[in-house]
Structure formats: C-alpha cells, structure tokens
Image: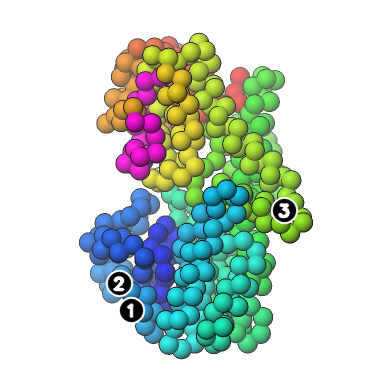
Amino acid sequence: MHIAILGAGYVGLVSGACFAEFGVDVSLVDSDASKIAALREGRMPIYEPGLDRLVADNAKDGRLHFADTLEEAMAGADAVFLAVGTPSRRGDGHADLSYVFAAAEQVARAAKGPLTLVTKSTVPVGTGEKIARLVHAIRPDIAVASNPEFLREGAAIGDFMRPDRVVIGVEPGELGDRALATLKRLYRPLYLIETPIVATSLETAEIIKYAANSFLAMKVSFINEVADLCERAGADVHDVARGIGLDGRIGRKFLHPGPGYGGSCFPKDTLAFARTAQDLGAPLRLVEATIAVNEDRKHAMARRVIAACGGDVAGKRIAILGLTFKPETDDMRDAPALVVLPELAAAGAELRAYDPEGMTPARPLLPAGVHYATSALNAALGSDAVVLLTEWNEFRALSPDKLRGAMRGKTLLDFRNVYDPAAMRAAGFEYYSIGRP
C-alpha cells in the first residue's frame, strides 16, 4: 500500500515512520518546507526516543519519503492522513479546525482518483461529517474516515506498534465500507497480533478520542486533590493510589500525584470537549472541574515553593530540575514550568534551570532572566532551594550528598515524589513532597 501523510509533526512523523516499519510505502509532506529539508538531512524536528533511528532506517530502505508538494506525496496513494494541528482557539477554548478543513480541501482538489481521507488529528464530534460534505462537493469518490491516535509522548513508538486498540470511524454507505476495508488492510500487522479493532461511525470515533483523554486527565486531577487531603490527614497518597489502583475497575495508571498535567493533548482536548458539550446542551461538569483543578494546581506549586522558602523568595536562588511537561520529550506545551517559573521570577527569585531536552524550546517561553545550567548539579550550585518539576531518570540517580553539597541552602521540593523522604532528610535536606506525611 501507499499512503500520504499531511503534517510531519509529532503525530504525522511517528505514524509515518511506524507505518513504514509495517512495510507500507509512506510519503510525508508538510507546509513547513524547512521541516521536510531537515528530515531529509536526518535531523528530527522533535525528540522522541528511538524515532531518529526508525526514520533513518525506513528512509534508507526506501519506504519513507519526504515530499515537497502535496501532489507529489499523493501520487498513487490509497489513503491520505490528515495530521495537522488543532490548537485551542484563542478566546473560547474550542479546537481551531481551520488547518484541518484547509488540508481536507487541498487533498480533495489534488486527488486524481478514489482514495480514503483519514483524519488523524484530534477533532470535535461532527468534524468528520463536515469534512465529508466539504470533500464530496469537490470529489464524490473520496471516502472519509476518522482514525484517532493514542500516542503517549516518550512512548509513542511502542504505543503505535503495540496499541491497546485501533479505532476506525467511517461514514455510512458504500464509501464507508471502502474506507473500513482500506484501513483494516493498512492495520493488518496489528490485526495479526490480535489487536482489537473498534469499527464505528465518524461521530463515535471522535468522541472516543476526547472521552479517553478527558477520563485520564480526570484521574490525574483526582489523585492530586487526594494528595492534598493526605497531607492534611497524615496519610500517604502512594499507598492510597496503590490501594485503589489494585481494583481492576480503576487501574493503577495515571494515579501519580504531581504539579498538574500538561502537554499537547490533555489541556486542549479537555477544554475542547467541555466547550463542544456545552454547545450541544450536554455539559460535562466533571471535565469542567478537571480543567479548573489542574489550572489551580500549577499556581499552587509556585505558592508551595514560596512558602517553603519562608514566605519570600526575593533575592533567593532557586534551582529548577525539569522543564518539559513529562520526561522523554522536549514538549513544553502547557508544562507546569510555564506557570511556576514566571510566578517565582515575579516574586523576585533568581532562577537556574536544567532539563535534558527542553531548554532550547523553553527559552522563548520563560522569563528572560532564567539561567540555563549544564547539569542538575550545576543548576543547584549555590542555590537556596531545589525544585524538581519533571522526573527525568538522571534526576532519580542524583547523589543526595552531592546535591546537598552543591547547594547554599537545604530546601528540596520534590513535586514528583522521586526521592525517598528518609534518605533526603538523612542527607540534611528540608524535604517537601506531594501527598506524603
């Protein structure tokens, strides 16, 4: 099979490289010509473990191509995937679908024959039906499908190769039957390892994506609020999480307390899901509460730092370990650091930050006065307090004695509960964590 993918960002590039690994002939195209040029030179526009090698191997073997034009990418394609951005629309929180509709129209006008147009981008319910009307007015033989992605940054390749399920939404009638057959053929390698294939309508597939992300976001906000309760009651949130997570109806995942969720999906998807539900007259109160709890959570982390420093951080040097919203990615979108660091800087703190992959994308997003260190210990040098925001593995391996020796003060705020409290206190720290007595 041959497919074209419009959008060489996170979803498009990972999906394209993984489809190529399945043996599919894949052409990637992007409106940003510099991104395509970089990929041809072997330079990755994003950091994702293992992606550089996967892209290089499949490009070398001739299965993964980087096209300059949509027409070039679509030549002979059985399916075209839309993997363009759907950011939150400024002002109201709805998903901005302008890129999706523009891309769909471009595909319809460039098509030379029947094909399947697949929306990989995360879109609100009803978008697929609008895309179908748009493209059918130009090319009635184009079949429209929805195939949402469920990729975790930092584990995206494994998620694509060994997914929990594949969701395929199609329009009714003969076109939908053709689209379903095309996508089942494309995903045959996963079918052979008994991956569940969920075939449904366009509308249902779109809701599945938003409902899945919103439910996981709710779990994160729930355990963060429970962590606050544990602190007041003298309980241990990790034991609580394990105690409820062992219940198969609840599950262990996404019950890790921290400074709030961020990234490319949860913040914008929960907001768009809530706004769409409001417009349809079926408000999602739990999702709305999740959004509010998470937003306040990030501000609460800054307040915790100031309180631990005696109520005033003016003139104090504070080291920040980790800037990205999670480890194993360079993604800064909606990271807690984007709230915590500006509030500390506004309160007069001198900030020294270190992140293994996130410092370059963080620079234009954070206050100008932030100093970017060469290592965790370098960031901690002469600091009055250290704040761990992102749980990169190299931070887990830090020697408590070396960290304490680099500092001027002794305050350590572990917002990911990476360290053992007894060991940190034995090393001389005033140690603060989340939801532990």
Mark 3 residue element: helix
The magenta segment is: 349-368
Q: Which mark is residue 365?
A: none
| Residue 228 placement: quadrant | top right
Picture coordinates of residue 369 (x, y %)? Answer: 34, 27
The residue drawn where x is 46% and y is 35% is: 338
The residue drawn where x is 27% and y is 31% is: 374
| Residue 128 placement: quadrant | bottom right
Quarter of the image where the C terminus is located: top right
- Looking at the image, which is closer to me, 43 or 311? 311
Q: Which mark is residue 68?
A: 2
Instruction: Give the residue furthest to the front.
Output: 91
Per the image, the residue denoted by label 3 is: 278
Distance CA(mark 2)–CA(mark 3): 41 Å
Task: Give yes or no for contact between labels 2 and 1 (Cβ–Cβ under 8 Å).
Answer: yes
Distance CA(mark 2)–CA(mark 1): 7 Å
Distance CA(mark 1)–CA(mark 3): 41 Å
The residue drawn where x is 40% and y is 27% is: 320
- Looking at the image, which is closer to me, 172 or 99? 99
Query: Would you place residue 294 above or below residue 44 in this image?
Result: above
* Mark 2 burial class by Cα count in 10 Å: few <14, some 14-19, many 20+: some
Q: Mark 2 vs mark 3: which is more N-terminal?
A: 2
Q: Is residue 398 left or right of residue 127?
A: left
Picture coordinates of residue 315 (x, y %)? Answer: 38, 14
Q: Which mark is residue 72?
A: 1
Quarter of the image where the N terminus is located: bottom left
Whether residue 172 is in magenta: the answer is: no
Whether residue 352 is in magenta: the answer is: yes
Can residue 23 be seen from the camera position used here?
no
* Mark 1 burial class by Cα count in 10 Å: few <14, some 14-19, many 20+: some
Query: Would you place residue 343 above or below residue 20 in this image?
Result: above
